[in-house]
């Protein structure tokens, strides 16, 4: 079936503008994750949605970052007043069950954000 | 101390040899361990998962877990140029569901 999809694949914006990134998880997957990967670095956890429970926002780097998810479907990550240090690839992943740490996370292709 | 540590490399291995990738983690209570492969410009893909002490084999790949020493390794036998990628070690900490990643080891297989 279809994998995790993300849009846009690339986004170039000016410093200070707001951006919205979209993630469509695999159908039926309860858990959804957002990660950030700076050039040459590992993945940095941002936020985790687990079914209908309150999301784990512990990785969001500042209050300029927010994310929403409607039910078990699409999620959007919003970055307000973008800064150059926000430039990175933003990766979304989903897994079948919430609260099941052993479940494989399937990654989308990512959105490459460049803040000029 | 980083939660998950890997040697960033680059690690160069001749084609056909065994590539050995290592990872250490700080939280002794961690239960789930994963190796992801990431080609340049692509998203990570799962190679192996391991949850119990010992070895787990899948084709040319073997994951090894030693909870007492808090390390997990990945061996790639008969390495191929197509194995050239960055290998990311990831751990799920106790009581949490998020993956904590190491910075990755860049592996190059030389023909």
Image (cartoon, coloured by chain):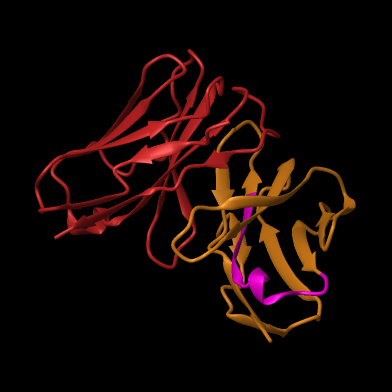
Chain colours: A red, B orange
The answer to whether residue B52 is magenta is no
Q: Is residue A103 above or below residue A115?
A: above
Q: Using the rendered view, name the quadrant where residue A20 is placed.
A: top left
Quadrant (top left/top right/bottom left/bottom right) for the N terminus of chain A: top right
**Residue stretch in magenta:** B77-90
Left or right of A61 in this view: A32: right
Quadrant (top left/top right/bottom left/bottom right) for the C terminus of chain A: bottom left
Residue B46 appears at what percent x and percent y? 65, 49
Viewer-side residue, B105 vs B37: B37
Q: Is residue B51 above or below residue B71?
A: above
Viewer-side residue, B86 vs A3: A3
Residue A61 appears at what percent x and percent y? 32, 44
Q: Using the rendered view, name the quadrant where residue B110 is placed.
A: bottom right
* Residue under the image location 48 percent in, 36 percent down: A4
Residue farthest front in this picture: A1
The total number of labels drawn is 0
* Residue under the image location 84 percent in, 58 percent down: B59
Residue B31 appears at what percent x and percent y? 74, 40
Residue farthest right in this picture: B54
Viewer-side residue, B26 vs A29: A29
* Residue under the image location 32 percent in, 34 percent down: A22
* Residue under the image location 48 percent in, 12 percent down: A52
Left or right of B105 in this view: A108: left
Residue B15 appears at what percent x and percent y? 74, 83
The answer to whether residue B84 is magenta is yes
């Amino acid at each position: 079936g279809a994998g995790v999809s993300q849009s846009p694949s690339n986004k170039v914006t000016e410093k200070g503008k707001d951006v919205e990134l979209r993630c469509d998880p695999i159908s039926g997957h309860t858990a959804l994750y957002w990660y950030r990967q700076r050039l040459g670095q590992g993945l940095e956890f941002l936020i985790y949605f687990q079914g209908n429970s309150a999301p784990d926002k512990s990785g969001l780097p500042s209050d300029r970052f927010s994310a929403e998810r409607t039910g078990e479907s699409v999620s959007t990550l919003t970055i307000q007043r973008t800064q150059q240090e926000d430039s990175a690839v933003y990766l979304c992943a989903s897994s079948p069950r919430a609260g099941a740490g052993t479940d494989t996370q399937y990654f989308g292709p990512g959105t490459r954000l460049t803040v000029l | 101390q980083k939660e998950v540590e890997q040697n960033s490399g680059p690690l160069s291995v001749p084609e056909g040899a065994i590539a050995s990738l290592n990872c250490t983690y700080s939280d002794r209570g961690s239960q789930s361990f994963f190796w992801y492969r990431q080609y340049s410009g692509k998203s990570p893909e799962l190679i192996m998962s391991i949850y119990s002490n010992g070895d787990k084999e899948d084709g040319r790949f073997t994951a090894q877990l030693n909870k007492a020493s808090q390390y997990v390794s990945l061996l790639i036998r008969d390495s191929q140029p197509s194995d050239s990628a960055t290998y990311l070690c990831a751990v799920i900490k106790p009581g949490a569901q998020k993956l904590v990643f190491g910075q990755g080891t860049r592996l190059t297989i030389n023909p």
